[in-house]
Image (cartoon, rainbow, N blue to C red):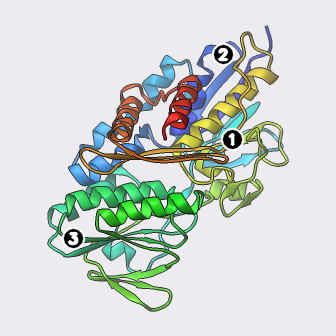
Amino acid sequence: MGVVKKLVVIGGGFGGLRVVYDLSDYVYRFEITVVDKSEYSLEKPALFEVALEGKDKQDVNIFIPPLLREHICGYSNEEVESIDKQNHKVLLKNGDSLKYDYLVISSGMQNSFNIKGFNEYGYSICNTTEAKELHNALKNFKGKSATIYLPKNSVFEGIAIELSFRLKERLKEAQITLILEDELLKEFSKENQDKVKALLDEHSIKVLENKELVEIDANSVTFADNSKLDSNLNISFPTLKVPEFISKSGLETNEKGVITDDKMKVNGSENIFAIGDVNAKANPKLGFITISQADVVSSYLTNIEDVEDPMEPIEFSGEILYAAAIDKLEGLLLYKNGEKEKVWVSPLAKFMKMGFTKEYYYTNGKLPPQGAIKRLEKILESIK
């Protein structure tokens, strides 16, 4: 029996919980501690329901202390100050520290809104509080137009596309405009980009690409080229920035996050890993990529530690899988793996979205295993 290794996981969201569940059969080798300033893991896919349908905040938050105890994991309800790489310690803002043999950073990125007037007139759905504020605004909405803005280095475009459809379903008579600082679905082929644009047009949703939003007020938005657009409701996704504790720790980063190798090892370190939005390889920023990176790290650790029955080695592919609801009947599935692409409109895609959301909540973040994902990919490849 090998020496028990201390594994510290920063963040109890998609990626952090995935690592916990992956390694729960190996607690004889890994002593896991999760560090998170929140006691709740947010079920992000359900934020649409909070904003558009008024779902209770308590129904999209998973209380993590008991489930971590169930999986024999420690928990520190604190905020991280920095990482002491030389002494293998996570330094906490309360003055305490946690020693680690391995460290997994799954903190997500820091949200930033660089738009004049956003605090007074803007809305977002990054958390339950913001989603509730948007819901209240929608209840009282009497305007004729609404905008959704996606800046560069933000969430995956599919999320903004889904919000456009869902908002149109709610505000049937209003003009909805999706504004992007970049191109729509730039990861996909021109053919599939046009297919999604045609679908948005079919639902009377306008798309403006390569437009930087710089200012908003109660009834309009202003772009960097000084052009304006009428808008009575302004929703924006954030620009994502590297968290301050990472900058303090001297980890190598770029504007997209922490730089790692294909095993998610942080450059210059053999025992620090970064997964999810905080990893520069998570491009686009998407939950499916987060859990894929968590699986890569977990499989790598079980193999280098030579545990009994290690996980099958997993390679990171960067594949994209996102299911979006369009309306009460239809859904949109976006899939890309290398040269393979699928843009598929079907009621089944809507059910996939519903199933994913419900499974995450009712299983406390236990998303489908790799085997189920591979079977799904084969089904997608068979669809004409």
The answer, for residue 176, to whether it is visible in the render is yes
Residue 354: x %, y % from top left:
34, 37
Residue 115: x %, y % from top left:
45, 77
Which amino acid lies under the numbered mark 3 shown in the image of this protein? Ala
Q: Of marks 1 and 3, which one's residue comes earlier in the chain? A: 3
* Quarter of the figure that contains the N terminus: top right
Can you tell which quarter of the image residue 289 is in? top right
Mark 3: which secondary structure? Answer: loop
Q: Nearer the viewer, mark 1 or mark 2?
A: 1
Mark 1: which secondary structure? Answer: loop
Q: Which residue is labeled 3 in the image?
A: 174
In the depicted view, which residue is nearer to us: 200 or 15? 200
The answer, for residue 240, to whether it is visible in the render is no
Q: How many marks?
A: 3
Can you tell which quarter of the image residue 173 is in? bottom left
Measuring 64% from the left and 43% from the top, which residue is drawn there? 275
Measuring 53% from the left and 19% from the top, which residue is drawn there? 71
Q: Is residue 148 left or right of residue 337?
A: left
Contact between marks 3 and 2 (CB within 8 A): the answer is no
Measuring 58% from the left and 57% from the top, which residue is drawn there? 188
Q: Of marks 3 and 2, which one's residue comes earlier in the chain? A: 2
Q: Which residue is labeled 1 in the image?
A: 317
Q: Which residue is labeled 2 in the image?
A: 26
Residue 31: x %, y % from top left:
66, 22
Residue 24: x %, y % from top left:
59, 18
Whole-number angstrom distance, CA of label 3 to CA of label 2: 54 Å
